[in-house]
Image: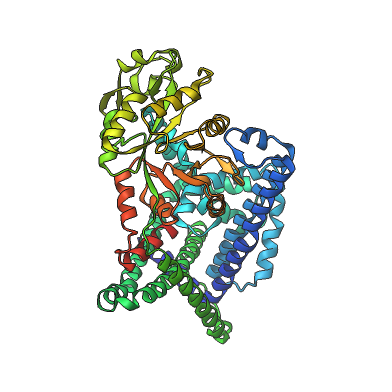
Amino acid sequence: MHKAGQVMRQAVHNIYVYRFDYVQVFALIRIFQFLLMIPVTSIVLKLMLRVTGFTHITEQNWQSFVTHPFVMIMICLLILLFLLFVYYEMGFLFLMAFHQQRGIRYRFLPLWQQLNRKVVYFFSVQVLFLIVYLALLMPLASFMLPLTLTQSVSLPHFLTEEIMSSRAGRLAYAAVVASIVVMIGIRSILTLPIFTIQPNISILRSFKQSWRFSKRGLFELVVLLAMLLTGHLLMMLGITVITTFPLYLIERLMPSAALVTAGLTLAFLEMVFVVLFSLLQAMFSQVMVAITYNTLVMGKVSATTHRKRRYKPLLLISGIVFLVLSMMNINSLEKSIYAPDTKIIAHRGYVAGNVENTISGLVSAANAGADLIEIDIQQTVDGEFVVFHDRTLRRLAGKNGVIANMTLSELKTLTIHQNGFSDKIASLDDCIEIAKALNVALLIELKVHGQETEDVLPKLVEKLRKYKVLDSYYVQSADGQKMTQLKKLVPNLRVGIVYALNIGPMEENVDFIALEESWVTEQLIAELKQHPTDLFVWTLNDDRSLQTFIEKNVSGVITDHPDVARELRTQQSEHQYFLQRVLNRLRFIF
């Protein structure tokens, strides 16, 4: 622990002494990221769509898209660009830390040139080791360094949902996380600092050195990283409490000044959080270098050049940014006074305490306050509609039966199980009758298995017409062609297409789009509102995601937790204090 304390003190000392260097470096990194990396990625994507002739990319056409020669070349270039950005971003910080800890004077240009000399490895087979290295560290980097480019890179939730839907999947996922991401990822964590600092070492040799070093110093490294993260979180919490206390008082004593105070408070916290995350990244690089090269003596450096530097330009820029952020926040918070009208859609009913797609789940979802209840239907061999998600009975009934080969009466005799609960399979008629009795509308998803009758759509329409729900129910499917046909067949029925993946503009002749959350962008939300086409986002099961999309006031959020979603939507009401709005905004921004 004594050594850990020395490392931490040295890191803080160096960052303070070279504070102006860090301000310049982080400013350049953010400018490069937002003014070059993001626009270039967008331009390349639009170019790929134009060259290939695709309007947008979905789970139905993505294989054809990515196998196009031009797209393959562009994807490789984007991956290379991403790797180079991470390399220069972290490499610069590692080199700065190394020189600072050794007390060696440095200038930015020689550091840049040293990094340039290693770029040759990015055009060799060894780049594959760097790709694996970054993939293994992605979870750690996105958690500890949320302002880096890795922040938005994650595994889509619809994939993890399928993985976690079975016991075997959960065990496999846990094993992969424990053995690969944690052990291999952490043991290779020193690869990048070793590669960037040592001028004549390859990526492969850096990986081997990290592996050998961490064999004896892994525990110390993990402890230091845990201390860094804990201290960072405690500091954020303390600053948030102190900063928001005046807003708490003003809202109760001078409500007329609450809006302006809230805007100023949020702007201040946003700037402070950016600084804190940048400091965490700097501390991270300092600790990595100190552990790798055992530099425990604080570097001696002449601070005369730093003393001559003035704070005025930095203070002026900070003041301008603060004012701009404050005005933007005041405008945004004023608009959020009005409650969003986002629909809360219960995914397959309410699965907490029930089996999915059952009558009991439907009743529980209605009691939880869902505006719509989503159910999955399939056509049986006798042309009827059964409420069931999977193509087979294996997951819920433990049998090998295929839904398309069984009759509705056969299916309704079976008992299905999920999370310790049991229930019976229901028909579409059963669910509609219960939903009408509960005065709640259904979002019906048609699962297409390829063995439907030719009149499957007219049969579904007739069923909805029979119960007089054509004007109040929603129907969706991943089969866009069938949904387009359905819309032409019944123009007054709300029809939508389900996408697990989408890149590019959406120009569908339907009423709504149901899209997996990983692919929803601000640009897409704006485009759909112009049509107008409703946007349902699925499947949102954590508070942060729900808060984000309710705040954006999308048309609907599909969730397994309709009660939580409803509570979050209620918190956006006009009676909510601005303090709560500020805290909510900080939660989903950071």
Q: Is 234 positioned to the left or the right of 93 in the image?
A: left
Question: Would you place residue 249 above or below residue 230 in this image?
Answer: below
- The residue positioned 37% from the left and 16% from the top of the image is 408
Residue 373, given in percent of the width and then of the height, sits at 35, 37
Q: Nearer the viewer, residue 145 or 298?
A: 145
Please indicate whether residue 564 sits to the left or right of residue 520 in the image: left
For image coordinates 49% across by 53% down, the residue present is 141
Q: Is residue 473 above or below residue 461?
A: below
Inspect this view and state whether residue 294 appears: no
Q: Is residue 510 visible?
A: yes
Classify residue 51 by image quadrant: top right
> Horizontal and vertical percent for residue 343?
38, 47
Q: In x, y percent, where is residue 425?
A: 32, 22
Coordinates of residue 459 in the picture (x, y in percent): 46, 22
Q: Nearer the viewer, residue 302 or 587?
A: 587
Q: Name the residue at 65% across, 58% down.
A: 39
Q: Quadrant of residue 404?
A: top left
Up the image or down, 429 lies above or below 265; here it is above
Which residue is located at x 67 percent, y 37 percent? 65
